[in-house]
Amino acid sequence: MRLIASHLSRLVRRPASWITLGMLAAMIALVFIALAATAEQTASQPGGEAILQLLTFPMAYAFVLTFAIQIGSLFAVIYFAAVAGSEWNWGTFKNAVARGESRGRYVLSAYVALGLLAGVGLLIVFLIGVGAAAVGAGIAGVGTDGLGDPDALLGLPNQLWRAWLALAEAGAIGFAFATLARSSLAGVGAGIALYFIEEFAGLLLPDVVRWLPFQAASAVIAGADTSGISGGAGNPLEPGIALVIVLAWLVGSLAVAAIYSERAEITG
């Protein structure tokens, strides 16, 4: 707990933490406001009514979380990689080891702190996204009667923790890349490259790509399929299976980062 608290204390003071949160929240809000602004034209196009369901509650709850995962995964990769790489770039990891800290415990505690911060950030983004969807529904003339749907509200905790796990998994990928490379820049670059490789490969090999980390993460939320709007594989995993795959990628990434940190030669 001491190490986690120390990491959290540093993270909340980093401008990157607030910038990342602000950018993600703004992008989610803009998606729904843009949909509302073009609702009249959208409704007259083939499939337009299906797109407008993004603004219809209670379905909008699932869509907000789905967009938070699909857009937030890229932000998580960048942010987690930047933090993990800075431990090596700034000599923080070296100093911690010199004080007698366990290498593996130090690395894993850094990830846990990042994961906790991501969870808080997800809640904030979700609330902002729901607010934007409700405003967008008003602009588009779509009713918000389902905003207080009891079944949807009762299911939100399950959907939220699934979304948090998806972001934690995406962050773990960037975290592992940056740890292996000992560099924020290299970790961010590798994570972004994998993200977009999955996006493009999903158009050609959807049955294969859906098992990869980012596509699996985007499938953990039931009740919302935005693949036709945001891209990605058109044959997503069933949410229960996706959750297992996400856990496997998360645990595997952390294991690689921890093992490498234990055996890495620290110089300089």
Image (cartoon, rainbow, N blue to C red):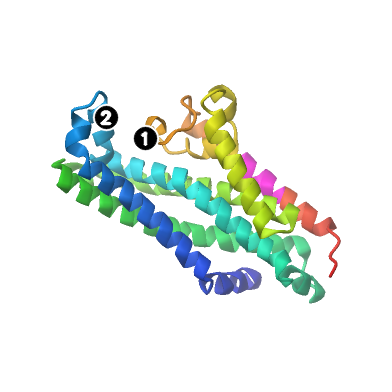
Residue at the spot of label 2: 50
List x then y, in percent, for residue 144: 17, 44
Q: Nearer the viewer, residue 102 or 17?
A: 17
> Which quadrant holds the N terminus?
bottom right
Mark 1–mark 2 Cα distance, whole angstroms, equals 11 Å
249 to the left or right of 34: right
Q: Give the residue displayed 53% in from the left and 28% down from the top.
A: 202
1 to the left or right of 159: right
The amino acid type, in three-letter code, at marker 1 is: Ala
The amino acid type, in three-letter code, at marker 2 is: Ala
The answer, for residue 180, to whether it is visible in the render is: yes
Magenta run includes residue 48: no
Q: Give the residue displayed 48% in from the left and 24% down from the top.
A: 235
Q: Nearer the viewer, residue 156 or 62?
A: 62
**Which SS class for mark 1?**
loop
Residue at the spot of label 1: 224
List x then y, in percent, for residue 240: 50, 33
Q: Give the residue displayed 68% in from the left and 61% down from the top.
A: 85
Q: Give the residue displayed 39% in from the left and 29% down from the top.
A: 228
Magenta span? 247-255
Residue 227 quadrant:
top left
